[in-house]
């Protein structure tokens, strides 16, 4: 009888231990799979341990499209009896800045027109005299001017679809406007320097060998407009 009681006690102890172990495992599983309390909208008092959510909003207003061009262009040379190809060698004239702060991604174009180069009654031909490209060493270079982001601007560099050199036919009045830099849509956003290093803006003047000496002048008109 005594042996039977001892055996019964041992079995009960084992069953009790097994029940405690199962309860512990089930409890741990329940904690591991516990979901956080549903979040509520922030702005009112919430209980400790409760989440709340809010919406962060940044409103950006589009700015303007603008450009800063050289204040002048200038050429100089000595007549030699041969035709002259003259580049504007002033560093400050070999680049310009386009600032597209519109946020539209429409792209932009740079345009130019020029009146006939004259000195007194003497003139240079309207056709074949004035041109531009991305070189100051060759009038026939097909290179485009460089494009770089201005310091402090995380710009999107322009994809330029212009073919160089661009011949600019002058006229005594109402000269034709030519596109000299043409960006694809979504490019050219931010502040972009056109020209400079390594490919400067080349402003070229072709002077025939029979030209009259003197200081020739022309009104050159530059503009930046929206759209590719």
Image (tube, rainbow, N blue to C red):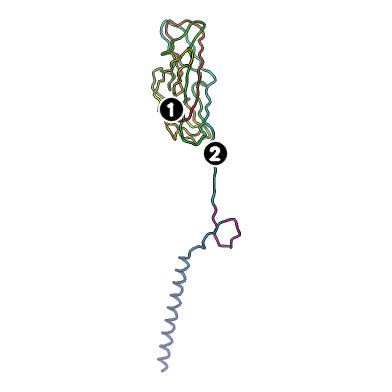
Magenta stretch, overall SS: loop
Residue 27 location in percent, x, y?
Answer: 47, 71
Q: Kindly indicate the quadrant of the structure image that contains residue 59.
A: top right
Q: Is residue 43 magenta?
A: yes
| Residue occupied by mark 2 | 61
Residue at disc 1, secondary structure? strand
Q: Position of residue 156 (x, y in %)?
A: 46, 35
Tell me the residue at 49%/30% (across/down). 192
Q: To which residue does mark 1 refer?
A: 182
Residue at image coords 44%, 21%: 178
Relative to 21, residue 208 above or below: above
User: Which residue is outermost to the front?
Assistant: 174
Question: At which x and y percent is residue 58?
Answer: 54, 44
Looking at the rendering, the stretch of residues picked out in magenta corresponds to 42-54
203 left or right of 52? left
Q: Secondary structure at mark 2?
A: loop
Position of 13 with respect to 72 (left or right) is left
Q: Quadrant of the C terminus?
A: top left
Vertical placement of residue 62 versus 12, above or below: above
Query: How many numbered marks does the figure carry?
Result: 2
Look at discs 2 and 1 and give the one toward the viewer.
2
Q: Quadrant of the N terminus?
A: bottom left
| Residue displayed at 42% across by 29% down | 160
């Amino acid at each position: 009888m005594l042996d039977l009681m001892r055996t019964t006690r041992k079995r009960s102890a084992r069953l009790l231990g097994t029940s405690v172990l199962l309860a512990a495992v089930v409890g741990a599983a329940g904690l591991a799979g516990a979901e956080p309390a549903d979040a509520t909208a922030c702005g009112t008092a919430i209980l400790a341990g409760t989440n709340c959510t809010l919406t962060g909003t940044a409103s950006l207003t589009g700015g303007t499209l603008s450009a800063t061009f050289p204040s002048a262009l200038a050429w100089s040379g000595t007549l030699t009896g041969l035709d002259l190809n003259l580049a504007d060698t002033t560093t400050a004239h070999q680049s310009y800045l386009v600032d597209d702060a519109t946020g539209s991604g429409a792209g932009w174009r740079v345009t130019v027109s020029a009146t006939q180069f004259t000195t007194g009654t003497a003139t240079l031909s309207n056709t074949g005299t004035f041109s531009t490209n991305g070189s100051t060493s060759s009038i026939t270079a097909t290179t485009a001017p460089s494009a770089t982001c201005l310091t402090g601007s995380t710009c999107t560099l322009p994809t330029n679809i212009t073919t160089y050199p661009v011949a600019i036919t002058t006229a005594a009045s109402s000269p034709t406007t030519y596109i000299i830099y043409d960006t694809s849509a979504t490019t050219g956003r931010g502040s972009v320097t056109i020209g400079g290093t390594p490919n400067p803006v080349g402003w070229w003047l072709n002077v025939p060998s029979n030209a009259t000496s003197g200081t020739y002048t022309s009104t050159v008109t530059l503009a930046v407009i929206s759209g590719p």
